[in-house]
Structure formats: structure tokens, C-alpha cells
Image: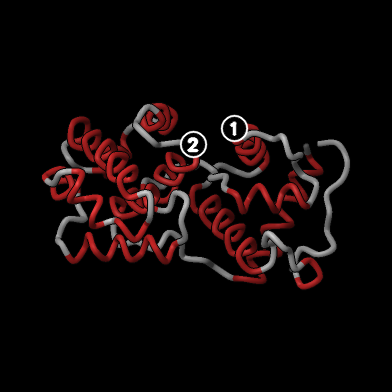
Amino acid sequence: MDRVKKYLNEIFVILFRTFGPQHWWPAETPFEVAIGAILTQNTNWQNVEKAIANLKESGLLDPEGLYSIDETTLASLIRPAGYFNIKARRIKALVNFIMAEFNGRIEEMSGIDYKILRRRLLELDGIGPETADSILLYALNKPVFVIDAYTKRVLLRHGIINENAQYEEIQQLFHEVIEPDAGLYNEYHALFVRLGKVFCKTKPLCKECPLHPFTYSGER
């Protein structure tokens, strides 16, 4: 475990030196982050930005606004993000939860132990681990490491995980070897995303990658 801890810390240093601070998640409010976490499922960020812009232009990007409209209207506004009927239902589930349990204020969720809150979020329609953890980390500043496709791809290609590694297993690895700091987790995950988009693509650019030729090997 000491070796993988050393390696993961080295990765962070290299990526931060290469790309600098990422200032992620781009949003004006914690609630916007939460809605964006649902909208970004199975689509790219450019499409999410279009859907968010529609909600802002309609004056509905707050819990009360989204609570007051029906799913059909919501779906039409978020159409650019794709799967708009499904995502409208999921947004409604989250908004209803915030309205019923936290007086319509997502900030009040910060007062709940994040492990308990995570379980509650996972009970909502369409909220899986990645979406729940994105809300916890980026909207509520909780020390939860988000695992996404980019993270898995980088770790797999560098021999840190195997192809059968599950979400919770990978997340636990980070929680065990990286100090529980929301700011650090935020930056590290954002750097993985940047690396995945620029170098560690489906067809990787390994020779140009800042992590080349580092490969972890050995027991944890």
C-alpha cells in the first residue's frame, strides 16, 4: 500500500505541474453543481452548458423553480443534454428530496454526515455512485473521491487497478492512501478528467502524455 500511495501522490504532482489548477466544477451555486451532475450523465459538458443556460434564461435554476414546473416542461428545457425525459425525472427526484428534507436549501445538506447523506442520495431515482459523489464533493465540499471513466482508464493503463475493479473498490483505494481533503480530491479528480480528455483518450497519446513512461507494478 505504501508503494501505491507514493505512486498516486507522484501522479498528482506531475499532473498539477503539467496542467495547473482546474477550477472545477464550473457553476455559480451548489445547486447548479447538483443539477449539472445529473445532466452530465451520458453526454459531454458542452451539452450540459446549453441545458443549464436554458434553465437560467427561464429563471428556474433553483429548487423552488424546478419544483414548481412539471416534468414535461423541464424535459423540454434540458433537451440539449440528451435523455431529457429520464433526466427530468431524476432532477425532479432530487429537487423533491431537497424541498422535503432540507427546506429547499441544498446548503442545509452540508450539516448531515456525508456517509449518511450518500446513502440517502443513492436511494433517489437515477442517482448512482458517481452522481452522488459529484454532488457531495463539488456541491457540498465533502471529502469523497469521484471515480469516473477517465479515472478508471488512467489507473487501468498504469497498472494500478485491473479491468474488473468496481467503483467502491477504486474509491476505497484513494480514501486509504490520499488524505481526506475535499479540496485535494476536487483537484485530483479534475486533473484525471483533463488528462483523459487531452492524452489518455480511447486511442491514447502515450508518448506525449506527462505520465509516460511511469507504470506502477508490485504489491500494494
The way the protein has been coloured in the rendering is secondary structure
The disc labelled 2 sits on which kind of residue?
A: Pro
Drawn side of residue 86 relative to residue 67, left or right:
right
* Place of residue 65 in the rendered image (x, y in percent of width and height, measured from the top left): 14, 50
Residue designated by label 2: 129
* Mark 2 closeness class: few <14, some 14–19, many ≥20 residues within 10 Å: some
Which quadrant would residue 142 be assigned to in this image? Answer: top left
Is residue 147 placed above or below 10 in the rendered structure? Answer: above
Is residue 58 placed above or below 93 in the rendered structure? Answer: below
Q: Quadrant of the C terminus?
A: top right
Query: Which residue is found at the position 24% from the left and 63% from the top?
Result: 54
Q: Quadrant of the N terminus?
A: top right
Residue designated by label 1: 168
* Place of residue 155 in the rendered image (x, y in percent of width and height, measured from the top left): 72, 49
Q: CA distance from mark 1 to mark 2?
A: 8 Å
Residue projecting furthest to the right:
218
Residue closer to the observer: 6 or 205: 205
Drawn side of residue 159 relative to residue 171, left or right:
right
Query: Which residue is found at the position 83% from the left and 49% from the top?
Result: 216
Q: Secondary structure at mark 1?
A: helix
* Place of residue 43 in the rendered image (x, y in percent of width and height, measured from the top left): 46, 56
Is residue 85 placed above or below 1 in the rendered structure? Answer: below
The disc labelled 1 sits on which kind of residue?
A: Glu
Drawn side of residue 131 relative to residue 35, left or right:
right
Which label sits on residue 105?
A: none
Tell me if label 1 and label 2 are in contact, CB under 8 Å.
yes
* Mark closer to the chain start, 1 or 2: 2
Query: Which residue is found at the position 58% from the left and 59% from the top?
Result: 193
* Place of residue 102 in the rendered image (x, y in percent of width and height, measured from the top left): 21, 35
Drawn side of residue 216 relative to residue 23, left or right:
right
* Mark 1 closeness class: few <14, some 14–19, many ≥20 residues within 10 Å: few
Residue closer to the observer: 105 or 100: 100
